[in-house]
């Protein structure tokens, strides 16, 4: 059997990859309605079990946001940023 068929295949693993935990706008709206929040930051998301302490958070644009809130996260998608600012809220990148 030729050598290239005897040796096991292995892929490429990018060591510099940054992996985010995605949180959608409908999840944020649910938190605001349930707990009457005006600011959502990493500690709020961690205390409600959406992220763990070493995660990086990215806010994604699925769903609607009707409340005026301040959102603090590591990254935002373009649609989420427009939706938060259209509702009268503000974003802060950590």
Image (spheres, rainbow, N blue to C red):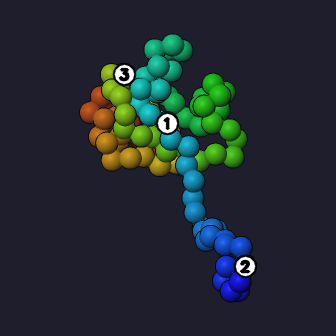
Looking at the rendering, in which quadrant would you find the N terminus? bottom right
Q: Specify the farthest residue to the bottom.
A: 2
Question: Disc 2 or 1, which lies upstream in sequence?
Answer: 2
Kindly identify the residue that appears in the image at 58 percent across and 63 percent down: 17
C-beta proximity under 8 Å, tags 1 and 3: no
SS for tag 3?
A: loop
Res. 67 mark: 3
- The spot of residue 18 in percent (x, y) is 57, 58
Q: With respect to residue 88, does 31 lie above or below?
A: above
**42 horizontally vs 75: left or right:** right
> Dot 2 corresponds to which residue?
6
Res. 23 mark: 1
Give the mark toward the camera: 2 or 1.
2
Question: Disc 1 or 3, which lies upstream in sequence?
Answer: 1
- The spot of residue 39 in percent (x, y) is 49, 28
SS for tag 1?
A: strand
Question: Disc 2 or 3, which lies upstream in sequence?
Answer: 2
C-beta proximity under 8 Å, tags 2 and 1: no
Kindly identify the residue that appears in the image at 54 percent across and 15 percent down: 35
- The spot of residue 80 in percent (x, y) is 36, 39
- The spot of residue 4 in percent (x, y) is 66, 83
Q: With respect to residue 44, does 5 lie above or below?
A: below
Foreground: 32 or 4? 4
Quarter of image, res 25: top left
**59 horizontally vs 43: left or right:** left
Foreground: 37 or 10? 10
SS for tag 2?
A: helix
Kindly identify the residue that appears in the image at 55 percent across and 35 percent down: 41
């Amino acid at each position: 059997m030729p050598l290239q068929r005897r040796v096991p295949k292995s892929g490429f693993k990018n060591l510099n990859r940054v992996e985010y935990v995605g949180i959608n706008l409908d999840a944020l709206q649910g938190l605001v309605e349930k707990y009457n929040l005006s600011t959502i930051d990493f500690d709020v998301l961690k205390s409600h079990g959406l992220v763990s302490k070493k995660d990086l958070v990215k806010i994604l644009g699925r769903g609607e946001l009707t409340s005026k809130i301040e959102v603090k996260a590591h990254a935002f998608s373009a649609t989420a940023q427009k939706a938060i600012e259209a509702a009268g809220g503000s974003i802060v990148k950590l």
